[in-house]
Image (tube, helix red, strand yellow):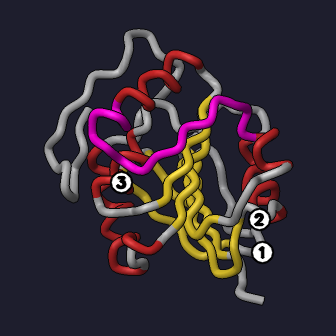
Amino acid sequence: MRIIGGHWKGKRFVPPDKIPARPTTDFAKEGLFNILSTTWDLSQVRVLDLFAGTGNISYEFGSRGCPNITAIEQDKRLVTFIRQQTETLKLPIEVLQMDVFRFLERPTREFDIIFAGPPYPLPNLKDLPQLVSASTAMAPGAWFILEHNPAHHFEQHEFFLQLRKYGTTLFSIFERPEF
């Protein structure tokens, strides 16, 4: 695995063996970050990475100058790995070992971009757009980006903004209105 853009472009990292994670492909990350970098000033955003896995998406944000990243991951080995990489690369990532759904019940602050790359067979994956948009974690005008496969459809959600396809990896993007 590698970081595909920013200060640490090309930096490779090797996650632990037999991890319960499915890292986002380079092809999909490149497409996603092309959209993000033309829409947002990444040096000014607060990012929340749900189901952080290996930290792949958090590293991309950090490499591009994002100053405030919070990664939520439940697996202890992956949390340790993300913390090690964060320290090595000197990235501004706060890693919290906890259940994503418990975090969303009581977030400590608002975020401008919330990314979720949950396990595709997650039983309540279909509920994530509603849970995130109802949470105080999502600032007015914020984006929620949900990575999923073609078996899921979210175009009918009230905050749905756009769908981006990169092979079998899809990103549904939702935007909370500015009140």
- The quarter of the rendered structure image containing the C terminus is bottom right
Q: Amino acid at mark 2?
A: Ser
Indicate yes or no whether the magenta region holds residue 90. Answer: yes
Q: Is residue 60 left or right of residue 79?
A: left
Q: CA distance from mark 3 to mark 2?
A: 24 Å
Q: Nearer the viewer, mark 1 or mark 3?
A: 3
Asked if the residues shown at circle 2 and circle 1 are in contact, with their CB atoms under 8 angstroms apart, the answer is yes
Q: Estimate the x, y position of residue 63 in percent, counting from the top left.
A: 28, 54
Q: CA distance from mark 1 to mark 3?
A: 30 Å
User: Circle 3 sits on which residue?
Assistant: 62
Residue at the image point whose x is 69% and y is 65% from the top: 110
Q: Which mark is residue 158?
A: 1
Q: Estimate the x, y position of residue 174 in percent, counting from the top left.
A: 64, 69
User: Circle 2 sits on which residue?
Assistant: 133
**Residue closest to the far top:** 18
Q: Which residues are magenta?
A: 85-100
Whichever of callouts 2 and 1 sits on the residue coming sooner in the sequence is 2
Under tag 2, what secondary structure?
A: helix
Which residue is more in the foreground, 107 or 1?
107
Q: Amino acid at mark 3?
A: Gly
Which residue is more in the foreground, 75 or 87?
87
